[in-house]
Image (cartoon, grey):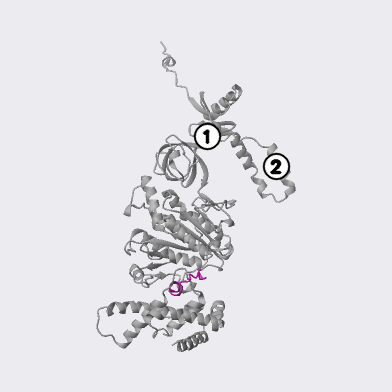
């Protein structure tokens, strides 16, 4: 007897697909029939279960969700598709053709039935959202929550979930909230009207001055220029601080670290450098990361007072901002600087400071449940800063020859330059200016430690007249510090040692400089040449600064030809040196 196996088969479960329709007016039977046919063929389903929800935000048409995919067939969705079809009009320069092209686009327009992926929030808190469903999302991509809050993907996990940092108030994001891809990386709106403005890391003005009129969207993350796209650093970026311009010159396209303990004058050096760029065709960007709002306001007030805001952009992410905004702040500032650099301009950017930036990234990483490493920082914190600072460059002439000079600031604890973050950034940059607390409290401003400070670009970025005027001053100062340490033990000093101490003490006085009072090139050269000639040795220490000011005023009033020659030719000669020394001796003899 033959057995019929088909008799014992259980009926298979039918594949039922749930389709959620958001609308104001429910679809008609005819529309439901067409939708059923579309989704049956698209998803190979046996049956469709429609769930219709009323949502006034749809305005018109339908917004359809199938699992983690979204079909935007609403009125606003159609308008967006129509707007995209007009992209070709932007490249059309003939006004007479625009009307005909517009009419052609409208007549040939068809609603695209495509879809986009949709995810759902599984957990949210502390500015971090964990989402399910966005299978194809990319690292660094911006996603949009249904409440309007934006976020950036910072963690892609093997289990299909993704960690997103939020750029807004997470109180409106809750478990089950929908989130969609934008297929765009984080960027900042930008235009030339951004100069003189204060913006947040998302590019929104926070100074009450109205819209910046930006028509271009610039990515905050961008690969650094390659070797072929660069050329060597050869032009000086004068800070106006004699101790830096003479011994640790900074070139356009260089990265020079400003490092020191809290309250040792790091920000003052940066603001003085910005002030000194007036009338030198340099755009400045000041990025404040995790600073007090009052401190940022003080810097802006100082820049306005000296007319420096006309060529400066301030990117402010104060301590009250979330860790996610503090994290993207330096990249947003770098994007602003790159915009001008690739347009052939010279740019100076200050990151104040990268210690707080690293702390913000550590906070995000720990909230994303990444394994902590040294000092609880994530393992990629070095890459965090290297990909930022490597974007500073002197571009080649083929790329219009623009430059970006970076002055990152790092705060140390009790002068410990061997800590994790300081050593990381020292290894990335082209030199550092180390500010010492003991010098600062002793009244030496700026409190630059001659031994630990260095510029690896060196004389390649100095003008000829500055390079020759410096002479052996750095060596003389190093010898002075060494002999000063031994002289503290007491005992009689020989005549040469006493002279060296007297000369070194005078040099230290000459290198003192008031806040927000940068020195021009001719003022620095006159000071250095006269110091090398030991013309200040017999001047009492308390009078050295006043004699220096009066001497420079004398040159500017009665020897303006010398000042003009230094400022314009920028060439050193023995004749120039002798003219400076003879004029200075004449003035000092009459003064005494």
Query: Is residue 150 in view?
Result: yes
Is the residue marked by circle 2 packed among few (<14), some (14-19), or many (20+) residues within 10 Å?
some
| Residue 196 rendering spot, x and y as whole percentages | 55, 59
Range drawn in magenta:
233-246
Please say if 570 is above or below 426.
Answer: below
- Which residue occupies the foreground of this view, 16 or 338? 338
| Residue 440 rendering spot, x and y as whole percentages | 36, 69
Write down the quadrant of residue 71 in the picture. Answer: top right
- Disc 1 element: strand
> Mark 1 sits on what residue?
70
| Residue 54 rendering spot, x and y as whole percentages | 53, 28
For marks 1 and 2, the one nearer the N-term is 1
Please say if 253 is above or below 127.
Answer: below
Q: In the visual, does 514 lie left or right of 33?
A: left
- Disc 2 element: helix
Is the residue marked by circle 1 packed among few (<14), some (14-19), or many (20+) residues within 10 Å?
some
Q: In this view, which residue lies farthest toward the right?
A: 96
Q: Residue at x 56, y 33 (%)?
A: 58
- Which residue occupies the foreground of this view, 166 or 365? 166
Q: Main secondary structure of the magenta part?
A: loop
């Amino acid at each position: 007897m033959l057995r019929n196996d088909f008799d014992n088969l259980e009926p298979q479960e039918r594949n039922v697909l749930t389709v959620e329709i958001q609308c104001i007016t429910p679809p008609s039977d005819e529309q439901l029939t067409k939708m059923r046919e579309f989704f049956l063929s698209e998803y190979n389903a046996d049956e469709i279960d429609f769930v219709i929800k009323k949502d006034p935000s749809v305005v018109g048409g339908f917004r359809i969700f199938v699992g983690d995919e979204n079909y935007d067939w609403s009125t606003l969705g159609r308008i967006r598709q129509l707007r995209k079809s007009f992209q070709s009009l932007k490249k059309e320069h003939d006004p007479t053709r625009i009307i005909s092209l517009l009419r052609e686009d409208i007549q040939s327009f068809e609603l695209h039935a495509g879809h986009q992926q949709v995810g759902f929030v599984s957990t949210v808190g502390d500015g971090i959202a964990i989402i399910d469903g966005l299978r194809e999302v990319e690292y660094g991509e911006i996603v949009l929550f249904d409440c309007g809050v934006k976020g950036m993907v910072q963690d892609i996990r093997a289990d299909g979930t993704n960690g997103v940092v939020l750029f807004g108030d997470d109180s409106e994001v809750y478990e089950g909230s929908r989130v969609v891809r934008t297929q765009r990386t984080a960027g900042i709106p930008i235009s030339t009207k951004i100069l003189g403005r204060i913006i947040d890391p998302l590019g929104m003005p926070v100074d009450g001055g109205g819209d910046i009129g930006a028509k271009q969207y610039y990515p905050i993350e961008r690969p650094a220029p390659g070797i072929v796209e660069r050329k060597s650093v050869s032009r000086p970026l004068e800070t106006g601080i004699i101790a830096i311009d003479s011994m640790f010159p900074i070139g356009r396209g260089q990265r020079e670290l400003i490092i020191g303990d809290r309250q040792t004058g790091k920000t003052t050096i940066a603001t003085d450098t910005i002030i000194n760029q007036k009338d030198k065709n340099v755009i400045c960007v000041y990025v404040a990361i995790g600073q007090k709002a009052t401190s940022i306001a003080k810097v802006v007030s100082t820049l306005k007072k000296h007319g420096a805001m006309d060529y400066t952009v301030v990117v402010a992410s104060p301590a009250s901002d979330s860790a996610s905004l503090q994290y993207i702040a330096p990249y947003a500032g770098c994007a602003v600087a790159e915009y001008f650099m690739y347009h052939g301009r010279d740019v100076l950017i200050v990151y104040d400071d990268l210690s707080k930036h690293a702390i913000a990234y550590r906070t995000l990483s720990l909230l994303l449940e990444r394994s902590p490493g040294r000092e609880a920082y994530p393992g990629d914190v070095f890459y965090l800063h290297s990909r930022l600072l490597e974007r500073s460059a002197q571009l080649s002439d083929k790329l219009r020859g623009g430059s970006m000079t970076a002055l990152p600031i790092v705060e140390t604890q009790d002068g410990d330059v061997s800590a994790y973050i300081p050593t990381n950034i020292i290894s990335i940059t082209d030199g550092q200016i180390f500010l010492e607390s003991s010098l600062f409290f002793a009244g030496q401003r700026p409190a630059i430690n001659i031994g630990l400070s260095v510029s690896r670009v060196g004389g390649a970025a100095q003008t000829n007249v500055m390079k020759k005027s410096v002479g052996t001053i750095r060596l003389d100062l190093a010898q002075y510090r060494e002999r000063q340490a031994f002289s503290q033990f007491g005992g009689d000093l020989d005549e040469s040692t006493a002279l060296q101490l007297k000369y070194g003490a005078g040099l230290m006085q000459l290198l003192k400089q008031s806040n927000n009072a940068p020195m021009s090139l001719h003022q620095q050269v006159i000071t250095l040449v006269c110091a090398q000639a030991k013309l200040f040795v017999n001047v009492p220490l308390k009078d050295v600064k006043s004699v220096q000011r009066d001497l420079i005023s004398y040159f500017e009033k009665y020897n303006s030809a010398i000042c003009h020659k230094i400022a314009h030719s920028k060439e050193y000669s023995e004749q120039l040196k002798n003219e400076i020394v003879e004029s200075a001796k004449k003035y000092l003899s009459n003064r005494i």
